[in-house]
Image (tube, grey):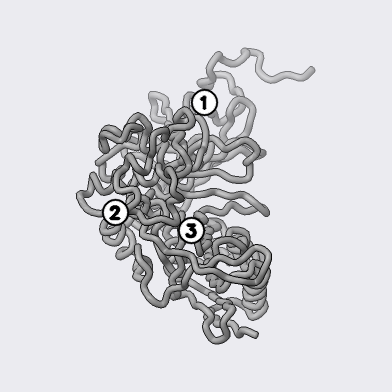
Amino acid sequence: MTSPVESFEDLLPGTRRALLHRIATAQSEGRAPSLVAAVARDGRTVWSGGRSCVDGHEPDADTQYRIGSITKTFTAVLVLRLRDEGLLDLGDPLEKHLPGTGVGEVTIAQLLGHGAGLAAEAPAPWWERTPGTTRPELADVLGEHPVLHPAGRLHHYSNPGYTLLGSLVEALRGAPWEEVLRREILEPLSMHRTSAQPVAPAAGGWAVHPWADAILPEPAEDLGLMAPAGQLWSTADDLCRFGAFLAEGDDRVLSAESVREARTPATPLEAGDWQGGYGLGVQLVHGGGRTFVGHTGSLPGFVAALWVSIEDGLVAVTLANVTSGPPVGVVAAELINIVAEAEPRIPEPWRPLPEVDQTLLDLTGPWYWGATPYVLRLTADRGLDFKPLSAGRRSRFVARPDGTWKGLDGYYMGETLRVVRRPDGQVSHLDLGSFVYTREPYEPGDAVPGGVDEQGWRGL
């Protein structure tokens, strides 16, 4: 019988036991040679646990596993950094920056969101179990028929698409993808145990026979040009750090605004897949009243999952060294659920604003779109929260230097809110994407498009 290796802070004993029970069940029922998991809360790892088929060799949160397609999220962050520096636009065709690929008409945004219509895999032989030297050129990765669907029409997951993005990073940085990754993401986030090649202690990859309790070692190939799609090795601790970054951003790597953009759905969902989506290198899953953002990954011998619940301030990571078996994506989501339900996030104390801008204060309170009531509140970060009193379109806004406001989320993301004043300086109305919001519902004399009936409100 194995004995667990655990490290934890702050969580209650009952919560820790529930977390351990969940991963123990996953390792046993999933028949994984080993499995390790960790949970972070508000940016700090608060629990980790490991299980193994070999007594006394349980993994811990510092043991490396291969993380497969979680690598894509790192590659996407590198591309967004290039955009934020003005070196490219997401709407640019690939050909503008990486000519000669044969698929250069697809845009960078379409590649990031798997909406470019490219094939899911590289041509045979199976790229995950063969050396990257088998495909020394991009033409070898793309093959003779790389385009399967019209660009921008649907989400079709493409590993070669992320090979192109990695080559784009190399072309614009003038350095290998691995070197750029280390310098621009891993070092700033103190992810010292994440690397392109395994560094001890690292788990070996195994396949488990489907009908017998027998195991077979899997090869660990260097993927070459395909590395930006799935090469990395990492630990539960390091991925918890990366999950905290996906929740909050880090100006040393990528701003909170750009990270929020990455978490926004980028391409239409596949038919019947209404519980999930894909942003810019980030998977989105809705379930049990929560939204999880992050990524899953697999390569021969390994499965991995990283999920973040923004509202709960929680990150969960599950890693196993088996080709298939434990549902690590489900397990990571359930680890978040266990903590969130047993120990809900304690809100920060309410505090008054450090200062009050009377001009902004005058904008707060009820507004009316026609006869529909909305309320505008001033937020602690000097932004505006604008929402209907019943169900409807809610958005938050941030001030621009020109006196207008930019929508941050929801229906009005990116739209402009303007405060329109009368000649005497008094506020007349709000203009939000051409919709007019007034202080009273259809008040005569207000700036209501089409005017207001002179007789005003009346009974039957």
Q: Amino acid at mark 3?
A: Leu
Picture disc at residue 274: none
Residue 123 location, x and y as percent?
A: 43, 43
Assign the C terminus to one quadrant of the image.
top right
Residues packed near mark 2 inside 10 Å, few (<14), some (14 to 19) or many (20 plus): many
- Give the left or right position of residue 110, taking residue 334 as reference: left
Q: What number is the disc on residue 436? A: 1
The residues bearing labels 2 and 3 have C-alpha atoms spaced at a distance of 20 Å
- Residue at the image point whose x is 48% and y is 42% from the top: 120
Q: Which badge, 2 or 1, is on the more N-terminal residue?
A: 2
Q: Residue furthest right?
A: 460
Of labels 1 and 3, earlier in sequence is: 3
Decide which of 33, 12 is in the foreground and name it.
33
Mark 2 or mark 1, which is nearer to you?
2
Query: What secondary structure is marked by label 3?
Result: strand
Q: Which mark is residue 177?
A: 2
Q: Is residue 347 left or right of residue 69?
A: right
Q: Amino acid at mark 1?
A: Val
Visible residue check, residue 253: yes
> Going 62% across and 35% down the picture, which residue do you hit?
271
Which quadrant does the N terminus fall into? Answer: bottom right
Where residue 425 sits, quadrant-wise, is top left
Is the Cβ of the residue at disc 2 closer than 8 Å to that at disc 3?
Answer: no
Q: Residue at x 34, y 42 (%)?
A: 140
Residue beneath disc 3: 299
Q: Residues within 10 Å of mark 3 (few under 14, many from 20)?
A: many
Asked whether residue 417 is in view, the answer is no
- For mark 2, give the secondary structure: helix
Q: Earlier in the sequence, mark 2 or mark 3?
A: 2
Identify the element where label 1 is drawn: strand
Residue 421 at what x, y percent from top left?
Answer: 42, 28
